[in-house]
Image (cartoon, rainbow, N blue to C red):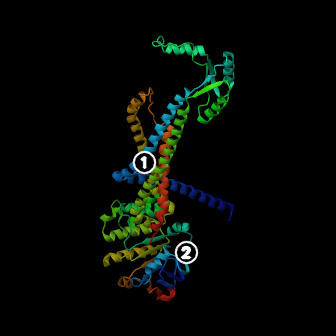
């Protein structure tokens, strides 16, 4: 082979390579379009599939929204979390203030302040303006106290701080009103595992629904598959329209789920706000952010695509030419 | 072009459809394959199109040893064959044009070439004016001609036909055979399975007969005449 003919051969190869690639792209485009047209031509039967996908995805997404808005609320509540140390009566004001200073310097403590017995007595009397005259108390029964506001609000770190405080000899009693925060955190963890479990379960449901729909599509076009295989169609060529069918189902289902979630969030906002206001709380309307919306639609497409691939892998072998 | 060398085909259950068949069809030949139903005609065509694999013996088609053809090579091998079926096997939900275009689309031809070549093939079978029709709107003979147009649109090296005139009246059958002869004249190797002995006898081509899976005639073209 001369250098020139070798170059010609290389050029020819390159040309076929490019035309192969453009043919491949063209078939992707054609398959995507023809699969979409199939959905559009059978609106009722295809709607059944993508609506099931949408409903299956709406449920965990709605739970997730409720959970994340609840978590935002509890973050605010926890900022009010504080520990009150009631000091023994024999502890002097100097000792009390020194201890407050020591606690204030600890890294887990955001702020600590000292309330002397007199201050406590004064503020107690102020809150009882009306009945204070009728109260006939002699002397001040209240102890001095230190209020500690921790920096970390997570329950295990709070527990560590509590252990330190419990060991202080000056402290008579600790009022740690954090058990409910701990309980709430555990409750939220439980709900979040529940949401994850639900999402996995309903994800499998989507997988099965799409798998079954694609299986029926393969079944109804078995004759066509047999014919085009005899005409030299590759496996990938045969699979492509069905793969796109899965993608379209996922996309439509994901978008419909997004719409359903938004509608439900809007619809539930007023009654939820009314309910929370009885606790003196306000509910911000929880929307799916752009990232969450993308995850919702993306996972809908991903799961349907997987369902389609499984159905193709299981059922395309039956469509060998005879 | 098609070389059977001591080829046997046994199906599961022990039924032997072909027993050590040797047959050589050269490039540019046109051959009729005859025999009663169940004699093995369909099995031979299935072996050539690699729907079935030989149980023993060697089969070489278009230079490819089919015994060694891997699954991923099968689609590309089939693109060199044109196949005409008795029941034409058209896609009923697509137009005549789209049906004939299928082999070109599968091979990834450019849309401009597709249009040109589909029109040429339809013109050859006399159905250019029917390109926008659905197959169901055509008569049996016309449907068969669409099937032939689809088989030849890619200018295959080998044209195979399984009872192409099985459902047609004698006049239409003659038309169809004339079409095959025309393709053969431009160099296509043609193999037609048919039990229409009367029609075959009037045409002057090599005839190969099968009986109970065995070849009755000699394997080479020279010895037959």
Give the residue pinned by disc 1. Answer: A56
Q: Between tags 2 and 1, which lies in front? A: 1
Is B210 drawn above or below residue B96 in the view shown? below
> Closest to the observer: A144 or B164?
A144
Residue B66 badge: 2
Give the percent coordinates (x, y) of residue B81: 48, 71
Give the percent coordinates (x, y) of residue B151: 43, 69
> Which residue is painted at 61% across and 36% down in the image?
A156
Residue B43 badge: none
Which SS class for mark 2? helix
Say how many tags the image has.
2
Residue B120 is at least partly visible in this image: no
Which SS class for mark 1? helix
Mark 1 belongs to chain: A
> Which residue is painted at 48% across and 53% down in the image?
A305
Q: Quadrant of residue B115?
A: bottom left
Give the percent coordinates (x, y) of residue B190: 46, 76
Is A228 drawn above or below residue B182 in the view shown? above
> Closest to the observer: A228 or B160?
A228
Please indicate whether residue B7 sits to the left or right of residue A4 in the image: left
> Which residue is painted at 35% across and 67% down in the image?
B126
Give the percent coordinates (x, y) of residue A239: 48, 59
Is B163 drawn above or below residue A259 in the view shown? below
> Closest to the observer: B96 or A261?
A261
Q: CA distance from mark 2 to mark 1?
A: 49 Å
């Amino acid at each position: 082979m001369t250098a020139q003919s070798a170059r010609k051969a290389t050029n020819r190869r390159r040309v076929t390579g490019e035309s192969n690639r453009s043919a491949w792209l063209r078939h992707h485009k054609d398959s995507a379009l023809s699969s979409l047209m199939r959905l559009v031509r059978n609106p009722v039967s295809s709607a059944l599939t993508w609506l099931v996908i949408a409903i299956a995805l709406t449920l965990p997404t709605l739970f997730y929204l409720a959970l994340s808005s609840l978590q935002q609320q509890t973050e605010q509540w926890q900022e009010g979390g504080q520990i009150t140390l009631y000091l023994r009566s024999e502890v002097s004001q100097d000792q009390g203030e020194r201890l407050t200073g020591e606690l204030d310097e600890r890294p887990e403590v955001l702020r600590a302040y000292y309330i002397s017995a007199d201050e406590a007595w004064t503020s107690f009397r102020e809150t009882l303006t009306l009945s204070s005259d009728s109260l006939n108390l002699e002397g001040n029964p209240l102890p001095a106290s230190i209020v500690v506001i921790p920096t970390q609000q997570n329950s295990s770190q709070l527990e560590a701080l509590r252990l330190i405080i419990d060991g202080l000899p000056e402290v008579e009693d600790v009022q740690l009103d954090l058990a409910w925060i701990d309980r709430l955190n555990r409750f939220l963890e439980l709900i979040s595992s529940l949401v994850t479990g639900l999402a996995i379960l309903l994800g499998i449901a989507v997988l099965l629904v799409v798998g079954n729909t694609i299986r029926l599509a393969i079944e109804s076009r078995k004759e066509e598959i047999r014919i085009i295989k005899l005409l030299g169609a590759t496996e990938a060529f045969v699979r492509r329209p069905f793969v796109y069918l899965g993608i379209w189902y996922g996309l439509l289902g994901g978008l419909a789920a997004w719409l359903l979630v938004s509608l439900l969030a809007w619809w539930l906002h007023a009654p939820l706000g009314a309910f929370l206001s009885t606790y003196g709380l306000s509910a911000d309307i929880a929307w799916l952010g752009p990232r969450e919306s993308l995850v919702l639609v993306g996972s809908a497409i991903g799961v349907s695509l997987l369902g389609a691939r499984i159905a193709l892998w299981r059922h395309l072998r039956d469509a060998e030419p005879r | 072009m098609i070389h059977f060398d001591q080829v046997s085909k046994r199906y599961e259950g022990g039924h032997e459809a072909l027993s050590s068949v040797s047959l050589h069809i050269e490039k540019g030949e046109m051959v009729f394959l005859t025999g009663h139903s169940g004699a093995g005609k369909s099995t031979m065509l299935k072996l050539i199109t690699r729907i079935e694999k030989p149980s023993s013996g060697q089969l070489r088609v278009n230079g490819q040893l089919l015994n060694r053809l891997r699954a991923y090579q099968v689609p590309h091998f089939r693109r060199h064959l044109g196949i005409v079926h008795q029941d034409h096997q058209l896609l009923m939900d697509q137009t005549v044009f789209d049906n004939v275009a299928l082999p070109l689309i599968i091979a990834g031809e450019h849309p401009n070439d597709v249009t040109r070549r589909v029109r040429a093939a339809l013109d050859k079978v006399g159905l250019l004016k029917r390109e926008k029709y659905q197959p169901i709107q055509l008569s049996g003979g016309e449907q068969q001609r669409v099937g032939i147009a689809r088989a030849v649109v890619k200018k295959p090296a080998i044209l195979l036909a399984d009872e192409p005139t099985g459902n047609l009246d004698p006049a239409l059958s003659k038309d169809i055979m004339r079409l095959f002869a025309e393709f053969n004249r431009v160099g296509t190797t043609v193999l037609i399975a048919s039990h229409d002995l009367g029609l075959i006898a009037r045409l002057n081509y090599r005839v190969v007969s099968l009986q109970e899976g065995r070849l009755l005639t000699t394997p080479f073209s020279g010895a037959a005449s």
